[in-house]
Image (spheres, grey):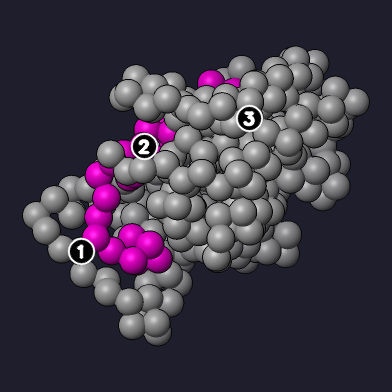
C-alpha cells in the first residue's frame, strides 16, 4: 500500500481507538485492559504471520535487545502512561495531547543531525497552531486534569523516542512479525505489574457490552492491525513524516469521542482540528521518504 492510503487508514482506525479504549476502561481495570489487549493483539498478529508463512525468527545477536527496547518504548511506556491519562481525561483530550508526539520526534531527529524539509516545516507550523488552540480550549474544559495531561505528554515523548529508535536500529523481520513480538513482549512486561493494581472486585461477568466491544476493537484493530501498519509507514516515510501524518488522529479521535461519548466541543476545537487535518495531509501526499542513516 502506498504511504498516503496507509497513513489515512492508520489515522481513521487509530482515531477510533481512543473512544474505544475509553469505553473499555469504563468496565476493565487499566493494567488488566492493557495486558489483555496487548496479548490478544500480539497473538492475532502471530497467527497472521503463521498463515502467511512469514519469518518469525529474529536473526543476529542484536535482534532480541532491539526488540525489547522497541517494546519498552513504543508499547510499554506508551500504553501504561496513556491508559492512566485516558482515565484522567476524556478520550478527545487524551488524543489531542498524545499527538504532540510529532514535535518531540522532530526535536529528537534535529538533535541527531536530521533537518526537516520545507513541507515538514509547514506541516509543523500548522500542527503547532492547531495544538495551541486545543490546549487553550482544554484549559476551559471541566474534565481537564493536569495530572492526566502530564502523563499523556510523557507517553507522547516515549513514543517519539521509540519511533526514532526503531528506524535507526532496525530488526530483520517482516513488519507484522516485528509488531507481534513487540506487543507480546510488552504484554509480558506490563503483566509483571498486575499485582500492583488495586483490587476492585472486577469479574468478567460485570463487563458491559460497550466495554467488551471497546476492548475487542482496541486489541484487534488498535493493537494488531494499526501497530503493523505503523511500522510499515515508519519504514516508508521515516520518523518525522510518519509522525506528522499522525496529526490527523486527534480530529478523528475527538470527533468520535464527541459523537459516541458526548464529550464537549467548541468552535475553537473545530478550527484547531481542521488545522491538524491539513498538517497531517501534507507529508503523505508529498511522499518524500527519508533515507535511513
Provide the residue designation for mark 1. Answer: 58
Report the residue at 52% width, 25% height from top.
103
Compared with 100, 20 (above or below) is below
Q: Position of residue 225 (x, y in %)?
A: 53, 63
The N terminus, quarter of image: bottom right
Q: Write the start and end of the magenta stretch as one range.
A: 149-178
The percent position of residue 274, horizontal first and vertical second, equals 80, 34
The numbered mark at residue 164 is 2
Question: Is residue 221 found left or right of 182 in the rendered image?
Answer: right
Secondary element at tag 2: helix
Quarter where residue 258 is shown: top right
Rounded to the nearest angstrom, the CA distance separating label 3 from label 2 is 19 Å
Q: Give whichever of 29, 181 is nearer the camera.
A: 181
User: At which x and y percent is residue 177?
Assistant: 34, 66
Circle 1 Cα neighbour tier, 10 Å, few/some/many (<14 / 14–19 / ≥20):
some
**In the depicted structure, whether residue 62 falls above or below residue 48:** above
Q: Is residue 17 visible?
A: no
Marked residue nearer the N-terminal end (3 or 2): 3
Give the label on residue 123, or none: 3
Please, what secondary structure does the residue beneath circle 3 have? helix
**Regarding mark 1 in the picture, which secondary structure is present there?**
loop
The residue at the point 31 percent across, 24 percent down is 112
The structure residue drawn at horizontal position 76% and vertical position 19%, both measured from the top left corner, is 133
Whether residue 66 sits left or right of residue 198 in the image: it is left
Check if residue 173 falls in the magenta segment. Answer: yes
Closer to the camera in the image, 149 or 115: 115
Which circle marks residue 101 in the picture?
none
Residue 264 among magenta residues? no
Amino acid at each position: 500500500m502506498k504511504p498516503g492510503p496507509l497513513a489515512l487508514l492508520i489515522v481513521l482506525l487509530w482515531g477510533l481507538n481512543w473512544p474505544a479504549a475509553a469505553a473499555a476502561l469504563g468496565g476493565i481495570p487499566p493494567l488488566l485492559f492493557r495486558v489483555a489487549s496487548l496479548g490478544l493483539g500480539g497473538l492475532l498478529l502471530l497467527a497472521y504471520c503463521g498463515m502467511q508463512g512469514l519469518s518469525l525468527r529474529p536473526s543476529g545477536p542484536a535482534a532480541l535487545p532491539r526488540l525489547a527496547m522497541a517494546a519498552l518504548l513504543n508499547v510499554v511506556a506508551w500504553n501504561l502512561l496513556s491508559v492512566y491519562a485516558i482515565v484522567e481525561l476524556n478520550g478527545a483530550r487524551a488524543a489531542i495531547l498524545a499527538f504532540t508526539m510529532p514535535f518531540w520526534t522532530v526535536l529528537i531527529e534535529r538533535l541527531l543531525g536530521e533537518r526537516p524539509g520545507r513541507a515538514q516545516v509547514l506541516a509543523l507550523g500548522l500542527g503547532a497552531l492547531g495544538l495551541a488552540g486545543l490546549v487553550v480550549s482544554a484549559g476551559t474544559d471541566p474534565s481537564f486534569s493536569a495530572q492526566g495531561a502530564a502523563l499523556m505528554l510523557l507517553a507522547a515523548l516515549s513514543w517519539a523516542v521509540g519511533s526514532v529508535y526503531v528506524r535507526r536500529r532496525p530488526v530483520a523481520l517482516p513488519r507484522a512479525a516485528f509488531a507481534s513480538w513487540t506487543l507480546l513482549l510488552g504484554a509480558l512486561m506490563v503483566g509483571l505489574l498486575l499485582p500492583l493494581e488495586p483490587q476492585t472486585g472486577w469479574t468478567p461477568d460485570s463487563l458491559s457490552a460497550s466495554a467488551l466491544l471497546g476492548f475487542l476493537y482496541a486489541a484487534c484493530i488498535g493493537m494488531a492491525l494499526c501497530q503493523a501498519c505503523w511500522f510499515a509507514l515508519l519504514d516508508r516515510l521515516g520518523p518525522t513524516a510518519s509522525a506528522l501524518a499522525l496529526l490527523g488522529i486527534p480530529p478523528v479521535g475527538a470527533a468520535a469521542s464527541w459523537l459516541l461519548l458526548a464529550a464537549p466541543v467548541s468552535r475553537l476545537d473545530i478550527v484547531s482540528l481542521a488545522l491538524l487535518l491539513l498538517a497531517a495531509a501534507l507529508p503523505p501526499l508529498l511522499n518524500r521518504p527519508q533515507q535511513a542513516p
